[in-house]
Each structure stands twice: as structure tokens, then as C-alpha cells.
Image (spheres, rainbow, N blue to C red):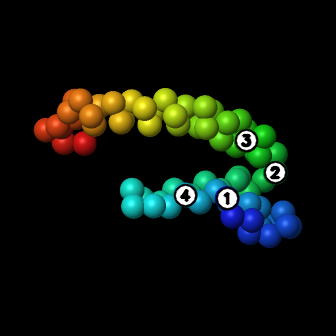
Amino acid sequence: MEETGSGPGSPPVLVLSGTAGLLTIRPPEHRGGWPDRAAFLRRLRDCADELAALLESRARNGACDGDPG
């Protein structure tokens, strides 16, 4: 997470980068939408391990070999 500033015009931003790509999640401009974004981030956190395990399992088992995507 990157703290871009303490004022409302510069809210914190989540930035993940690595060899697989770059992901940036910014909060909505209006603070009224921040609680919904926080709920989304918690759902993302809760499901990320499950998705990672599924991808690892399929990669090990060759289930995706030959698939275009």
C-alpha cells in the first residue's frame, strides 16, 4: 500500500507489482463510496488465497495446458 498523502485529495492507494503484472486499486473520489470499497477489498482478500490455490493446482496438474487463456 502506498500512502499518497494525508489529505482527502490524496487518499492511500493499493499497488501490487511483480513479474505477473501490475494492479492498482484506488478509492472512489467521494468519501461516501469508501465503505463499499473497503468491503470489496475484504472480499478480495478472503478469496485471493482460494484463487491462488486453484491456479497452482491446475498448473501442477496440467489442466490448463493447451488452453488459450
The mark that comes first in sequence, 2 or 1, is: 1
Of badges 4 and 2, the one in the foreground is 4
Q: Which mark is residue 16?
A: 4
> Relative to 14, does residue 56 appear above or below in the rendering?
above
- Look at 80% across and 70% down and name the residue there: 5
Left or right: residue 65 compared with residue 30:
left
The residue under label 1 is which amino acid type? Met
The mark that comes first in sequence, 2 or 3, is: 2
- Look at 81% across and 45% down and name the residue there: 32
Q: Helix, strand or loop at disc 1?
A: loop
Of badges 2 and 1, the one in the foreground is 1
Q: CA distance from mark 4 to mark 2?
A: 23 Å
Of badges 3 and 4, the one in the foreground is 4
Q: Nearer the viewer, residue 1 or 7?
A: 1
Q: Circle 2 is placed at which residue position?
A: 31
Answer few, some or many: residues within 10 Å of disc 1's Cα (few below 14, many 20 plus, some between 14 and 19): few
The mark that comes first in sequence, 4 or 2, is: 4
Q: Circle 1 is placed at which residue position?
A: 1
Q: Helix, strand or loop at disc 3?
A: helix
The residue under label 2 is which amino acid type? Arg
Residue 40 at least partly seen: no
